[in-house]
Amino acid sequence: MNTSEALQETLTITTDATPARTTLRSIGAVLCGLLSTVILTTAVDLALHASGVFPPHGERMADALFVLALAYRIPLNAAGCYVAARLAPARPRRHAFALGLVGIALAAVGAITMWDLGPAWYSLANIAIALPCAWAGARLQGARS
């Protein structure tokens, strides 16, 4: 095997491995965005329960408290989509919107499983905010670039 054949083989192997690496980095970016959203919203939820703003776990909250919960979920969801876009190996907007679609799916599952634990508008609002938050997160990342 001469030098040009060895170089061609090396380039072929590197090129073949790159899509798999990019796919893994894309999945990792979306998972990091999701994880950051879950950690942040859970931390705020726990802090509000611990401080007495929210009632103890198991007690139903007043609708005004659900408004508060939705109000801080919006920027935290956008921040998670920003993280996904920021960590994306390419096409950051697609990664932010991929997380938005994951958010729709998770919010829909949450709405179905917890329908009786809160007002219906809150469950539906969590579904509705997913894509606007993804757009906002993508815009934040775009403004930073």
Image (cartoon, rainbow, N blue to C red):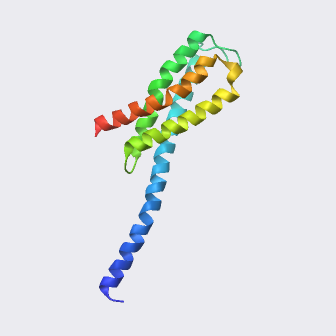
Tell me if I can see residue 84 in this picture: no
Q: Residue at x 47, y 28 (%)?
A: 76
Q: Nearer the viewer, residue 135 or 141?
A: 135
Q: Is residue 35 above or below residue 22?
A: above
Question: In front here: 128 or 106?
Answer: 128
Q: Residue furthest bottom?
A: 1
The correct choice, above or below, for 124 with respect to 16 in the image is above
> Residue 21: x percent and y percent?
45, 59
Q: Can the viewer see residue 68 in this picture?
A: yes
Quarter-of-image position of residue 126: top right
Q: How many marks?
A: 0
Residue placed at 64% from the left, 13% from the top? 61
**Residue 129, image x and y in percent?**
49, 26
> On the image, which quarter does residue 2 sit in?
bottom left
Q: Give the residue at x 52% y 26%.
A: 128
Front-most of 23 and 51?
A: 23
Q: Position of residue 12 (x, y in %)?
A: 39, 73
Residue appearing at x 38%, y 78% in the figure: 9
